[in-house]
Image (spheres, coloured by chain):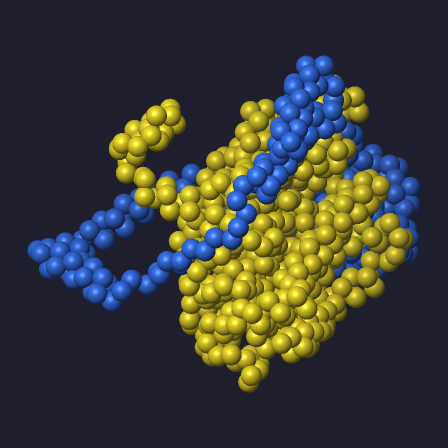
């Protein structure tokens, strides 16, 4: 035996290794190479937000009471004293005012959920626009989309637990959406809520779903997701020495691991800072939920706001089928998101069918080199932004004293027109940018139906074929492709973040 | 040096966090100290990695995922060899699948405990002929309760109000009303009552504009024209709000003169049956 067994850690490692045989696996893990690009960090930020969510969530779960029993508030927050409320809402108000660090962890938890979903969305955009979903990563794309769907449900379950006026109204809408599903809807709603709205014991069911069922699913899916990232190794952008059959970047041990753990603490620091200084969801101002009370300016969190917008844009029609009815809310709140997520799930296969490209890809596309995909993605985001706008238009309308009718009609037109305009604009911009580039900077495009310049080197090794030429261009052009992408994504993210803050500010003013 | 300093700052901030907690210094001090503790630790680690650890690019071969053909063949053969060794494969395999399926069905069956079947008592509200109108505090509503232009939310007397019982009661000059045929005597002294549950997604239709007599739902801005029978004039609601017929008794108190004119609440699959049941 060599001298590594002389240290206590070495001896412990040896003891374990002799029982599980992990040395080879450990060594290949320590040697694992991460390509460097800052758009690769979105997924990590999502992961670390989830860790913060679990940590703060455990603390909150120990103080929350999932009970609809009615109590008269007699706590420390004066304006609510003597008000009838559920034990659930009372426990949240107590957690916010009477438990030391309770408000900090509650607000950190809420911000972490918003950033978690935001990072997932940006990560999805990165994977989409760079073609990282192509073979052999289709399974991981499916895992990732599932993670996003479950995370959205988890977020909704979380803020519905508080039983304040805002979340209670959201739950009422959710009930009407559940019962709008043809044939099975009424049964489904009765099963989820335990009867006709508001049902019986819904909060304790939701609590079990929010703190146990969905987090377990998310944790398991994260495990699968990371395994499926590591198995073929991470994708990378083309560059000198970067080929389809290798990975160039930083080794896990020690540099990348240290950097990544550092990133975790930085993410936690930012979320904690937001939780302490940016008020979010002040439920004591909204008051307890009551079925016949409602406040104007009700806004869902951003990852649900687009559905609220879709519900608002839908014209007032439903479909009569003899004695049966396909309800109005079914179309915007079930069918539309159903189609959106089905398209997301199927995208890798649809694209492979259209392009005929079924080969393995480990080098990423620059968005400009795939104008059609980039344009479709941008169009989808444009439609999404219109729905976000529609979801909060009542707040703008009240703030600026506009009339809702013309605003809503403009949004209805924009929902169809803006994606087309954005799509066409982005398609042209991407194509022009791509054509202006020297041919050897373009993504390799074997068997693609998209415009492939005749002078581009054929085959997957074309991009990095001439490293010297590449470097010459690099000096001249810089690494502008990925930077443009990240800039665009960051702009969208910043717009969403700023919009959300402005919206919150306006809402609080309108209360 | 910078790294060491960052770790020291982090340590101090952690101690500060404990201090802030002990002194009950408030959310902002807790957040500030904990963020500094977390942030300097993160920055320290990042600097340590970037400055004092190897930064040169490494290259690693990408593993081939598709197995070589002979390995694939051998795996398939191993599976086939085992499969050929199983006797009574067809019958027992089929029975096993059936048994597992039955067990699966059996174990999920108790999910029925989650809720009652929705057939019985479907969408019955507390309103029927002769029920008094009361407000939130339990006070009976009379013909002198509201001025013209006034509005109040009312419930059926004599029962714990259910979600579907809420009714919005308004008083409108009779000459302004333009209700559908057959509802002429539903509005004693200009009192007109509609279900407060939006026919779109079930929110309370909580905003009333007495200029133009519009009811507006704050959730998705479905707007109803009260004088024409609360028909939707804007937004996503597909149906009018069902009207509750009213009458006044000799003491000047308001009562329901029957059940609602249509199904209460949002559209659902079996809406038609409810309509028939109510008729």
Q: Is residue A54 visible?
A: yes
Front residue (pair B3, A62): B3
Residue B169 appears left or right of A254: right
Q: Colour of chain B?
A: blue
> Quadrant of residue B138 in the image?
top right
> Quadrant of residue A495 in the image?
bottom right
**Residue at image coords 35%, 31%:** A4
**Residue at image coords 72%, 49%:** A497
x and y percent of residue B93 in the render?
17, 55
x and y percent of residue A280 in the render?
72, 37
Which residue reaches farthest top? B23
Q: Is residue A203 visible?
A: no
**Residue at image coords 48%, 53%:** B58
Q: Colour of chain A?
A: yellow
Query: Is A419 drawn above or below residue A328 in the view shown?
Result: below
> Quadrant of residue A14 in the image?
top left
> Which quarter shows the C terminus of chain A?
top right
Residue B152 appears left or right of B16: right
> Which quarter shows the N terminus of chain A?
top left
x and y percent of residue A230 in the render?
43, 51
x and y percent of residue A166 in the render?
70, 40
Front residue (pair A80, A121): A121
Front residue (pair A184, A335): A335
């Amino acid at each position: 035996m060599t001298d590594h067994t002389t240290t206590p850690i070495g001896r412990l490692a040896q003891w374990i290794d002799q029982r599980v045989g992990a040395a080879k696996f450990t060594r290949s893990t320590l040697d694992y190479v991460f390509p460097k690009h800052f758009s690769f960090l979105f997924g990590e930020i999502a992961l670390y937000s989830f860790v913060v969510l679990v940590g703060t969530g455990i603390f909150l779960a120990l103080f929350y009471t999932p009970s609809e029993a009615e109590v008269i508030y007699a706590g420390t927050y004066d304006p609510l004293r003597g008000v009838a409320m559920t034990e659930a809402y009372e426990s949240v108000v107590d957690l916010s005012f009477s438990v030391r660090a309770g408000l900090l962890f509650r607000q950190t938890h809420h911000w972490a959920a918003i950033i978690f979903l935001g990072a997932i969305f940006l990560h999805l955009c990165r994977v989409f626009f760079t073609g990282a979903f192509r073979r052999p990563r289709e399974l991981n794309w499916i895992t990732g989309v599932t993670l996003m769907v479950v995370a959205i449900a988890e977020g909704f379950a979380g803020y519905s637990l508080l039983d304040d006026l805002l979340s209670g109204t959201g739950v009422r809408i959710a009930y009407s959406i559940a019962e709008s599903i043809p044939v099975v809807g009424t049964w489904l709603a009765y099963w989820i809520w335990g009867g006709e709205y508001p049902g019986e014991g819904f909060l304790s069911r939701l609590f079990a779903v929010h703190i146990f069922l969905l987090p377990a699913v998310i944790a398991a899916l994260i495990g699968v997701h990371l395994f499926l990232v590591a198995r073929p190794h991470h994708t990378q952008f083309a560059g000198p020495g970067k080929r389809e059959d290798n990975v160039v970047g930083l080794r896990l041990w020690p540099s990348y691991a240290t950097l990544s753990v550092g990133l975790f603490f930085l993410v936690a620091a930012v979320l904690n800072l937001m939780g302490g200084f940016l008020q979010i969801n002040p439920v004591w101002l909204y008051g307890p939920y009551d079925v016949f009370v409602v406040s104007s300016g009700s806004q869902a969190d951003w990852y649900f706001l687009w559905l609220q917008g879709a519900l608002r844009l839908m014209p007032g029609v439903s479909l009569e089928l003899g004695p049966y009815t396909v309800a109005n809310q079914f179309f915007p709140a079930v069918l539309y998101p159903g189609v959106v997520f089905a398209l997301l799930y199927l995208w890798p296969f649809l694209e492979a069918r259209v392009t005929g490209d079924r080969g393995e890809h480990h080098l990423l596309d620059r968005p400009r080199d795939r104008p059609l995909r980039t344009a479709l993605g941008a169009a989808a985001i444009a439609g999404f932004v219109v729905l976000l706008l529609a979801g909060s238009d009542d707040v703008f309308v009240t703030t600026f004293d506009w009339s809702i009718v013309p605003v809503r009609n403009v949004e209805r037109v924009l929902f169809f027109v803006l994606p087309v305009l954005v799509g066409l604009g982005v398609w042209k911009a991407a194509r022009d940018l791509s054509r202006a580039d020297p041919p050897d900077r373009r993504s390799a495009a074997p068997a693609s139906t998209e415009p492939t310049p005749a002078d581009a080197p054929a085959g997957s090794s074309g991009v990095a074929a001439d490293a010297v030429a590449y470097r010459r261009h690099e000096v001249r052009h810089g690494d502008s492709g990925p930077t443009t992408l990240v800039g665009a994504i960051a702009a969208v993210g910043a717009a969403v973040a700023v919009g959300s803050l402005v919206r919150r500010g306006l809402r609080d003013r309108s209360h | 040096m910078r790294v060491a300093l960052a770790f020291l700052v982090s340590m101090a901030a952690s101690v500060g966090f404990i201090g802030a907690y002990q002194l009950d210094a408030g959310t902002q001090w807790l957040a500030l100290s904990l963020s500094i503790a977390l942030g300097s630790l993160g920055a320290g680690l990042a600097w340590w990695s970037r400055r004092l650890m190897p930064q040169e690019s490494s290259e690693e071969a990408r593993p081939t995922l598709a197995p070589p053909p002979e390995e694939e063949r051998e795996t398939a053969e191993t599976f086939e060899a085992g499969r050929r060794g199983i006797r009574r494969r067809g019958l027992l395999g089929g029975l096993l699948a059936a048994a597992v399926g039955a067990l699966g069905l059996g174990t999920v069956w108790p999910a029925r405990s989650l809720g009652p079947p929705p057939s019985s008592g479907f969408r019955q509200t507390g309103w029927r002929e002769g029920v008094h109108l009361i407000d939130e505090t339990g006070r009976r509503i009379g013909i002198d309760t509201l001025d013209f232009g006034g509005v109040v939310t009312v419930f059926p007397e004599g029962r714990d109000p259910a979600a579907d019982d809420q009714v919005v009661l308004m008083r409108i000059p009779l000459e302004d009303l333009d209700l559908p045929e057959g509802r002429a005597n539903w509005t004693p002294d200009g009192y007109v009552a509609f279900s407060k549950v939006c026919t779109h997604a079930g929110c309370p239709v909580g905003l009333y504009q007495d200029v133009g007599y519009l009811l507006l739902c704050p959730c998705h801005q479905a707007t109803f024209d009260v004088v024409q029978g609360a028909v939707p004039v804007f937004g996503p609601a597909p149906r009018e709000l069902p009207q509750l017929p009213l009458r006044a008794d000799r003491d000047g108190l308001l009562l329901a003169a029957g059940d609602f004119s249509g199904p209460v609440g949002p559209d659902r699959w079996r809406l038609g049956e409810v309509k028939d049941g109510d008729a």
